[in-house]
Image: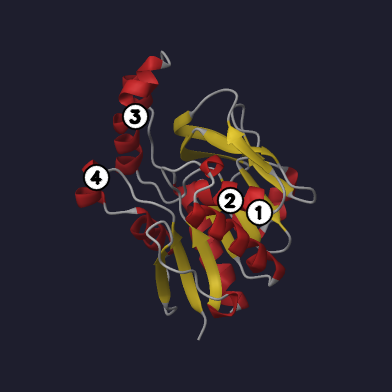
Amino acid sequence: MKKFVIIKAGRTFDTLLESLGDFEEWVEAGLCLKGMTVQVIDAAGGEPLPTVEACGGVVVTGSHAMVTDDLSWSLGIEYWIRSLIEASVPFLGICYGHQLLGRAAGGTVGYHPLGREVGTVTIDLTAEALCDRLFHGISPRFRAHATHAQSVLRLAQGAVLLAGNGHEAHHAFRIGKCAWGVQFHPEYTIRIMKGYIEEQRKSIEAERKDVEAMIAAVVDTPEAGKVLTNFANLVYRES
């Protein structure tokens, strides 16, 4: 039986781990999976990636690493993603996973010229997203949590742009029929987002941004969360 695979590309801050859990737990909770075997692979911790044939659907989590550091485990995921695309295995990359998909497909990843994007942000869907399965039932403009310094600066040839905003032009895209990347975090809750702002307080203040206002602006993002349940549903249909 094919498994739903979550590739763990790192871990959260130690200060958040005990009370909030870790990346793979947030993703699994958001997917609301029922009746499908879930396998978590700690790729950043050195665990081997599964065969493509064993995967019914794949999610790659966020990470505190940077894609351009070209860490060996990260390059391994990037190469593996190309095989998933070729085999039409449903794939969702979140933040770091989104960037890995972008580069695996032939795009460019690097530090965003406008600096980091942190907090609850507004995202606009493109016309193409209105009929895309991943964004089914999501408003053309919605709120989502974000925290990233690097971005997909240039999409691969043939990629379909699905969402963006004034800071991040490539908040979501699709490669082929069933490989998606989202720069925002559909798995984040209010507590997780506030925790990430607090952990980055010094660096945010160094950029002369109002941390307290940023925390006060954090709201629930149920529409962004639909990305995960939509992905889980389409994996079920294709399994």
Q: Is residue 74 above or below residue 212?
A: below
What's the CA distance linking mark 3 and mark 2?
23 Å
x then y, percent, for residue 79:
62, 60
Q: Is residue 127 above or below residue 22?
A: above
- Which residue matches tag 4? 14
Which label's residue is closer to the chain start, 4 or 1?
4
What's the CA distance linking mark 3 and mark 1?
29 Å
What's the CA distance linking mark 4 and mark 1?
30 Å
Contact (Cβ within 8 Å) of mark 3 with mark 1: no
Q: Please give the count of numbered marks on the rendered protein.
A: 4
- Tag 2's secondary structure? helix
- Which residue matches tag 3? 200
Q: Amino acid at mark 3?
A: Gln
Q: Is residue 116 above or below residue 162?
A: above
- Which residue matches tag 2? 100
Q: Quadrant of the C terminus?
A: bottom right
